[in-house]
Amino acid sequence: MNQKIDIQKYRSTEHPVIDVILRRWSPRAMSGEHVSRDNIMTLFEAARWAPSSYNEQEWRFLWAEKGTPYWDDFFSLLVPANQAWCCNGSHLIALIYKESFTSSGAHNAVAQLDSGAAMQNLLLQATELDLVAHPMGGFDRQKAIDILEVPQGFSMAAMIVVGKPASADILSDELREIEVPSDRKKLSEIVSEGRFSFDS
């Protein structure tokens, strides 16, 4: 049984934003149900339209569906703490980015930033489809490069699990306590006109 979260109970804005931004969060409870290939491709389609420096489109996505040999490879990359709940996901995605510009070969200082924009598009699209899409940094990057045969000149950015939402009751006591949308810092803590004026 899916658990509907009242976003307004946990989040409020200082200024209006579009609804999907506020509704996007990173739950861990997933039902284990299959997510259709059409929906997965829709997530990648959304990612495809992200902005990038010189339209480089540095991002590359590798994916695996649960129940296939690829899934076992992807799942083995996750740290045990993430494996504990990702086992109920439908798909795992590895986000990779090209480190240099294709035209010149020069180092692309914003490649990871651009890839993050593509990931955010994917996450927002998942929210619109009522899917869980939870990005993770808890995985073995070198093992991922080796197992996924990522060539030199590309780096691992993140992994994402995609699934259908479920009640938090399926989670461990520890995870169930934190299975709520997180709030954000005040604008005054992250925005400053002119010079840097933050405490940290």
Image: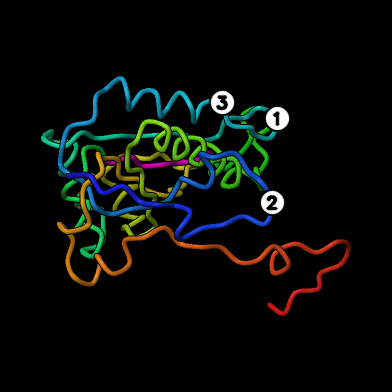
Image location of residue 43, percent across then percent down: 40, 29
Does the segment drawn in magenta span residue 161?
A: no
Viewed as shown, does residue 26 lie left or right of 173? right
Query: Is the stretch drawn in magenta largely helix, strand or loop?
Result: strand
Image location of residue 129, percent across then percent down: 37, 31
Q: CA distance from mark 3 to mark 2?
A: 26 Å
In the rendered view of the protein, which quadrant contains the C terminus? bottom right
Residue at figure coordinates x 34%, y 47% from the top left:
145
The disc, 3 or 2, on the residue closer to the chain's N-terminal end is 2
Residue at far bottom of view: 199
Name the residue beneath numbered marker 2.
15
Q: Indicate the secondary structure of the residue bearing disc 2.
A: loop
Name the residue beneath numbered marker 1.
54
Query: Splitting the image into 4 quarters, where does residue 54 fall?
Result: top right
Q: Which residues are magenta?
A: 92-98
Q: For the residues carrying marks 3 and 2, which lies nearer the camera in this image?
A: 2
Query: Splitting the image into 4 quarters, where does residue 94 fall?
Result: top left
Q: CA distance from mark 3 to mark 1?
A: 13 Å
Q: For the residues carrying marks 3 and 1, which lies nearer the camera in this image?
A: 3
The disc, 3 or 1, on the residue closer to the chain's N-terminal end is 3
Residue at far right of view: 194
Does the segment drawn in magenta span residue 93?
A: yes
Q: Residues within 10 Å of mark 2 (few under 14, many from 20)?
A: few
